[in-house]
Image: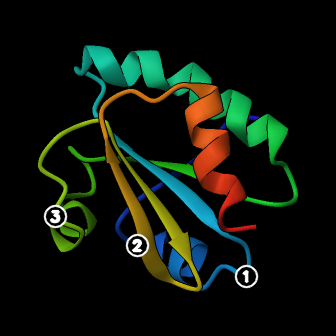
């Protein structure tokens, strides 16, 4: 189970209107740390399948949402619950760090 790719158009329906908590990875293809984060995101998506939605948003193609949430560094990981940002993390985070944060919102 890989993280689902979002864009400016489907972000609100997939994230803000989700009944489950959502972990959003704001990334860029050219970003080295982002490439390190992607397999970790895929593992989290597997581990939390059915409990948490794990999605990714390429900042180069989703400038509206990136600006809306003040994303100026990548990777930036935002956790949404009930349509609101409840956590914002900058940089690469391990599977165990993400699990600890996600577990707070389940």
Q: Nearer the viewer, residue 84 or 66?
A: 84
Q: Give the quarter of the image for residue 68.
A: bottom left
How far separated are the C-alphas under marks 3 and 2? Answer: 18 Å
- Evaluate if marks 3 and 2 touch, with contact meaning CB atoms under 8 Å apart: no
Would residue 49 be found to the left or right of residue 61 on screen? right
- Find disc 1 in the rendering and name its residue: 19
Would residue 87 be found to the left or right of residue 4 on screen? left
The residue under the point 35% across, 25% down is 34
Above or below, 58 relative to 29: below
Q: Nearer the viewer, residue 104 or 95?
A: 104
Mark 3 burial class by Cα count in 10 Å: few <14, some 14-19, many 20+: few
The residue under the point 34% across, 67% down is 8
Marks 1 and 2, the one that precedes in the sequence: 2
Q: Position of residue 32 (x, y in %)?
A: 28, 14
Marks 3 and 2, the one that precedes in the sequence: 2
Q: Nearer the viewer, residue 95 or 8?
A: 95
Q: Secondary structure at mark 2?
A: loop
Q: Position of residue 15 (x, y in %)?
A: 54, 72
Mark 1 burial class by Cα count in 10 Å: few <14, some 14-19, many 20+: some
How far separated are the C-alphas under marks 1 and 2? Answer: 19 Å
Instruction: Say which quadrant the C terminus sits in.
Output: bottom right
- Find disc 2 in the rendering and name its residue: 9
The residue under the point 51% across, 70% down is 80
- Find disc 3 in the rendering and name its residue: 70
Above or below, 45 relative to 6: above
Q: Position of residue 67 (x, y in %)?
A: 15, 66
Q: Give the quarter of the image for residue 44.
A: top right
């Amino acid at each position: 189970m890989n993280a689902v790719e979002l864009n400016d158009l489907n972000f609100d329906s997939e994230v803000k209107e989700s009944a489950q908590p959502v972990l959003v990875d704001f990334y860029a293809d050219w970003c080295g740390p982002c490439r390190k984060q992607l397999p970790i995101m895929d593992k989290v998506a597997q581990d939390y399948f059915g409990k948490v939605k794990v999605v990714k948003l390429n900042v180069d193609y989703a400038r509206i949402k990136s600006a809306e949430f003040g994303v100026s560094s990548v990777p930036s990981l935002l956790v949404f619950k009930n349509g609101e940002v409840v956590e914002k993390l900058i940089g690469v985070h391990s599977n165990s760090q993400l699990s600890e944060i996600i577990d707070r919102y389940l």
